[in-house]
Image (tube, grey):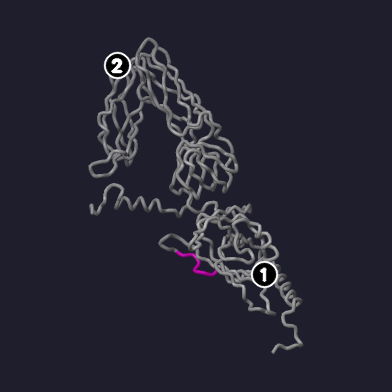
Amino acid sequence: MLNPFFLQGSKNEQNLVQDLINEQLRMYGVEIYYLPRKYITTKTVIREVIESTFNSAFPLEAYVDSYEGYGGQGTLLSKFGIQEVDDLTLIISKERYENYITPLAKGLPNSELVSRPKEGDLIYFPLGDKLFEIKYVEHEQPFYQLQKNYVYTLRCELFRYEDEVLDTGVEEIDNEIAQIGYIQTLTLVGSAITATATASICASGGVNKIYLSNMGNNYNTKPTIGFSSAPSGGTTAVGIASITNEYVNCTGTNGGKVQAVYISNSGCGYTVAPWISFNVIGNNTGAGAAATVGIATGVVQTVAISTGGSGYTSNPTVTFSGPIGGGITATGLGYINSAGSVTAIYMTHAGAGYTSAPTVTISNPTGMGATIGIGTYKFNEVIVGSTSGTTARVKEYTRSSNTLEVSIVDGTFTPGETIYGTESGAIYALKVQNTDDLVTPYADNDIIESEADSIIDFTETNPFGMP
């Protein structure tokens, strides 16, 4: 029977205990950030969370009950690399949560169970600059003192990122996921400006065409092209090789072959066709390539780039005006760098019969006439490919190199399409999408797959025979 001379859980006594606990938490606790989880997509049967976001962070005082350091198994070296398995136990005020966080969280869309801390929410722990996920909420310890509970005990584990969206507006929190997760790198190009160039000619004999008679085998890098020297007072020709791995050898592997030799300088003063050689250096294992050379008078000798332009996503074509009075019109192609500018022009045919330098025309970059190459992408904003409709989240944009790091990619971007920033309004053209993770040092899946393919490659044939 209860003693009638003592108060049993009066409101005043309960408020006094709660106030003392709140005061102790402010005195001996640390300020954390509480991040409620927003459920965007869940499975309808087992309620598995498919997509979630964290875009709110509430500062809150908490007592660190793990006074001897992090719990758990610490740092482990596993077959999947180095893993941190840290635990953390925090104690927060029940009253502070219900009076401060609950009213603010009630108005947030896609939120569930905001009346108390819930499993799956995150805690930013500033002392270790780490994010922890709440795995269990204990709300009955101490057990009903004066017929009431006053604190929540949060048992947390180090957060393992799985493409969740963190955009709280607190820089120190958002930076935690800036360089983690699976990241793809997009190489972009800026505003579309057509490159320009000028040509010079050689009135006497110059190399105007190279006829490839043997593509050779096993070239892992481009061989160096050599021409026999021009007569005294002349200029020796210069060429550059292009190799391909599209041809399959008898062994079933792709072998590097020379697919073309382009002319960067036709030379001048030749009276007979020069010899051409394919020279390998270093670890280049290629051999067997051979070609013959044709010469003519009045050839285009060199092409000098006046302005490299910008906005190119693929190598442009280069055309020349024809020789006056008849002859063979020169043809060429341009090469671009990662920034989308033309850096070199080579001739596939140097022409013949030119008595004056021809006009050089370089094709327009992709997107010419469109407004591209403007703005700066924002962290965490959604980008959209204009042609493919692919979406992704921005991790980091480096304007100097025009590279965009993205994650949570839904689809495959198409080279040449424009990439729109839905918040920033930034618009750039895509040159290359690299699906390998070049950012995260522990993302070795691509390397493991490549090494495994060298042992058993199912893309060519079934190594175990047909069933």
71 drawn magenta: yes
Please give left or right for residue 181 compared with residue 232 in the image.
right
Q: Earlier in the sequence, mark 2 or mark 1?
A: 1
- List x then y, in percent, for residue 355: 39, 12
User: Which residue is rendered at x = 55% and y = 63% of the image?
Assistant: 120
Amino acid, disc 2 = Thr
The quadrant of the image that shows the N terminus is bottom right
The quadrant of the image that shows the C terminus is bottom left
- List x then y, in percent, for residue 151: 65, 72
Amino acid, disc 1 = Lys
Is mark 2 in CB contact (under 8 Å) with mark 1? no
- Count of labels in the image: 2
Crowd class of label 1 (few under 14; some 14 to 19; many from 20; radius 10 Å): some
Residue ID for mark 2: 271
Please give left or right for residue 265 compared with residue 6 in the image.
left
- List x then y, in percent, for residue 226: 32, 28
Magenta stretch? 70-76
Residue ID for mark 1: 94
Please tell me whether mark 2 sits on a helix, a strand or a loop. loop
Magenta portion: prevailing SS class = strand
Report the front residue among 236 and 209.
209
336 drawn magenta: no
Residue lying furthest front: 44
Report the front residue among 430 and 37.
37
Please tell me whether mark 1 sits on a helix, a strand or a loop. helix
- List x then y, in percent, for residue 119: 56, 66
Q: CA distance from mark 2 to mark 1?
A: 96 Å
User: Which residue is rendered at x = 44% and y = 53% of the image?
Assistant: 443
Crowd class of label 2 (few under 14; some 14 to 19; many from 20; radius 10 Å): some
Residue lying furthest top: 325
